[in-house]
Amino acid sequence: MKHILRKARSGIITTTLLLMLIPLTAVAQTPQTVTVGQNATFTYTGSVFGVSYQWQVSTNNGSTWNNISNGGTYSGVTTTTLTIYSVPDTYNGYQYRVGVRLMTGGNSYTSGARLTVNSQLPVVVIQPDNKTVTEGTGTNFEFQVSNANGTLTFQWQVSTNNGSSWSNVSNTGIYSGATTRVLTLSNGVTYAYDNNRYRCVATHRNGVANPVTITSNAAALFVNPNPRITAHPVNRTITEGNSTTFSITTFSSSYQYLYQWQYRVNSTAAWNNISNGGVYSNATTATLTLTNVPISYNNYQYRCIASVEFRGYVWSENSNAATLTVTPAPTPPVITKHPDNVTIKEGTSGASFSIIASNCTSTFSYQWQYRTSASGTWTNVTNTGIYSGATTPTLTLSSGVTAAYTGFQYRCTATCTSMANSPVSSNAGTLTVTKDVAVIEVFPIQTSFCSIDDYITFTFTKLDNEHQILFRITFSEEAKAAGFQDRTTYETIPADLLLLIDIPPDVPTGTYTGEVNVECEGVTDLIANYPFSFYITNNDVAIVEQLPASQPLCGGASLALVVDVSGTAYGYQWYKDDEPIAGSNNNEFTAETDGSYYVEIWGTCGAIRSDVAVITNPTSPTGTNIRVKWGNVLYVENTSNKYQSFQWYHNGSAINGATFVYLSEREGFLGEYMVRCFRADGSYDQTCPVVFDVRTKSSAVSVYPTVLKPTDVLHINLTDTEFNAEATVEIYSLLGRIVYSTRITPQTATIRPDFQHKGTYFVKIKHPSGEIFSEKIIVQ
């Protein structure tokens, strides 16, 4: 209500405006009742206009009030409407009011309104608990809730890593009821499910914005083994000396089974564990093996204990017993008469070998065999040549037997067709064929050889195996003139019965003859002479000039490889790295890349091969080159010590002992020099060659001795008498370090360097003429 007062004061009319404030506390908020998870709103409905608004909450029945901020469950805290989203049950009993800031200043608050939250969430009644089952059986897990108004759904989950991660269970395999409150595992549980964890997630929907979920406890599944034997051993019947097996099959392969076979001598005796050995093997596996069983094992019984050790316990099961029946074996066939040794003269008849076989319930079949020596391989005899009766008890040899059959052995195999332990073989009988004179033969009588072959080969055939055979060789005069040499003393025939005669160099083409003289040691009447002849063919081609052993390609240039031959060459074929080079068929080839090259030259007797030329490309990005030092010392650059060792070459040949960075020649340098520089891994760079047309040796200075001991003196002689000024003397190690320095004035001077280490050193002398001279010395 407005009251206007007018009052005259000093002629001035004053108007006063009075505002009457309606107390906001009279504006009551409406209490709210919601179900947990629903939204709640409080709205300011007062008639007084406010500048701003601030909602407050009291959690202690109005004793204290606190401003609310937007966020979490709250929204609109500075507007006329406060919204609380998804109200939790903990807000039950909270009071809410709004503070209104008036235009005249100051805040006024409405009365508080209570929020009532009805708790209608499910309540857990039964939690799933741990289960222990035996492999092959089933079980279930139960999760029960109550007080669930609205829709309630379930989803079971499984963890195979002790709860680190979870995955939903579906109604497949052993699972059913995956979306109900009871999860069922059928009778197919195996060890693979051991230590799985199971839980259930229940979701409650009651018209609220956000469904409420309840997760059960995690329950463990423990699967104990079931060492059940599904197939037991069965009875066996065998004949003595044969083999057999007993086996079991277990219920599951998920566990590491332990097996122990046992036996007892009869059905009332005690059981004994079996160990591998004797007739037994595989005694701790699912299959027991018996080998070569004797008759004494008849009526033995066998069983197996199958065990599983798990979580400190042992589960086991005994199999049924199986009986072994061993029947006696029939008396085996036997050879009662073996073949005798036989000795006959060459060309006579009547030689035979025979056997007698017994103990056959039906009939015998026979097969004779022979071998050429006591260590030879047995071969079946057929009724051909000198043999007859090869499949009868008696083998007969005709009059065609020669001394070549001496030492042959014969045996017979008898087979009884009705018996399993047949056949049986006889002992061996040995044949000896004597000869009055001839004890050896030489083959061939006539043969051809090439002049480039290393030797001529003669084959002996020994006809007398009882005596030591000796031989010597005599050649015709023509053969001796061509270079063949007699063997004048008797020698023992080689064990391989091959006689080798060296072919002399440059032997002319032609036929040559000789004679092998043979005798039996200690038997004077057993002597024989065997003439022979052979033909020598000249190859008519020879290499006059070979390829270089090694050659570098420098600066990208090509290299001509030439081989010079004498005689008639019918063809050439060049090779690189053992592969033929197409179209390279004359005596010259131009190499443009590195590799190993050689050429084959064809003559009358075949191909001869040149030496191998190793062509290298020494060009490298580092520019490794040979340098001249002190006028007559060569050295190779070794920047950053990339090379570990060196090999110097003179005119293509390695210089013995020249394996350091320096090279010095006592007589000076003349010819072509190059060096291979090796890295630690064995690879190397090769320098281009340096050529000296004139020997570099200076005659103005001499140093001696060049081999001395560490404490010896060193003599230096300046031979040029025109100079009497000082000469500088310096001594360097192979690593290039100076180890001694001095000056000398007389023409002949003596110095004592006192070397600290043994090894190779270089003496550098700067002559008064300005010429620098060096000498290599060795300190021992």
Image: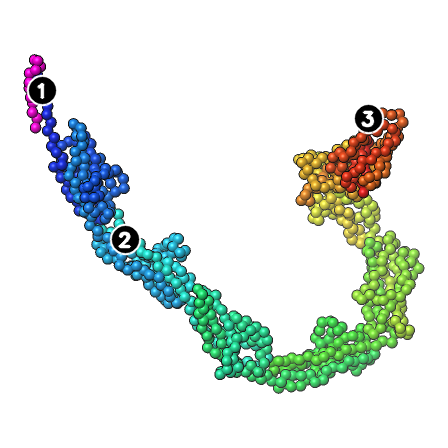
Q: Look at the image and say whether residue 6 sits in the magenta stretch.
A: yes
Callouts 1 and 3 close, C-beta under 8 Å: no
Q: What residue type is labelled 3?
A: Gly
SS label for mark 3 = loop
Question: Residue at horizontal 80%, vertical 53%?
Answer: 604
Q: In the picture shown, does residue 69 fall above or below 439?
A: above
Q: Mark 2 points at which residue?
A: 203
Residue 752 versus residue 330 in the image, above or below = above
Q: Which of marks 1 and 2 is nearer the N terminus?
A: 1
Can you tell which of label 1 and label 3 is closer to the viewer? 1
**Residue shown at the point (36%, 57%) measured from the top left:** 158
| Residue tagged 3 | 770
User: Quarter-wise, where is residue 525 in the image?
Assistant: bottom right
Q: Distance between the residues labelled 1 and 2?
A: 70 Å
Residue drawn where x is 13% and y is 35% of the image: 24
Give residue 608's position: percent from left, percent from top: 78, 51
- Residue 627: mark in rendering: none
The magenta segment = 1-12
Disc 2 marks a residue whose amino acid type is Thr
Q: Which of marks 1 and 3 is nearer the N terminus?
A: 1
* Image x and y of residue 642, in percent: 67, 38
Considering the numbered disc 2 on the image, is that residue within a helix, a strand or a loop?
strand
Residue 500 part of the magenta segment:
no
Q: Can residue 76 be seen in this view?
A: no
In the picture, measured across the screen, residue 422 lies left or right of residue 350, that is left
Residue in the foreground of this view, choosing between 629 and 653 = 629
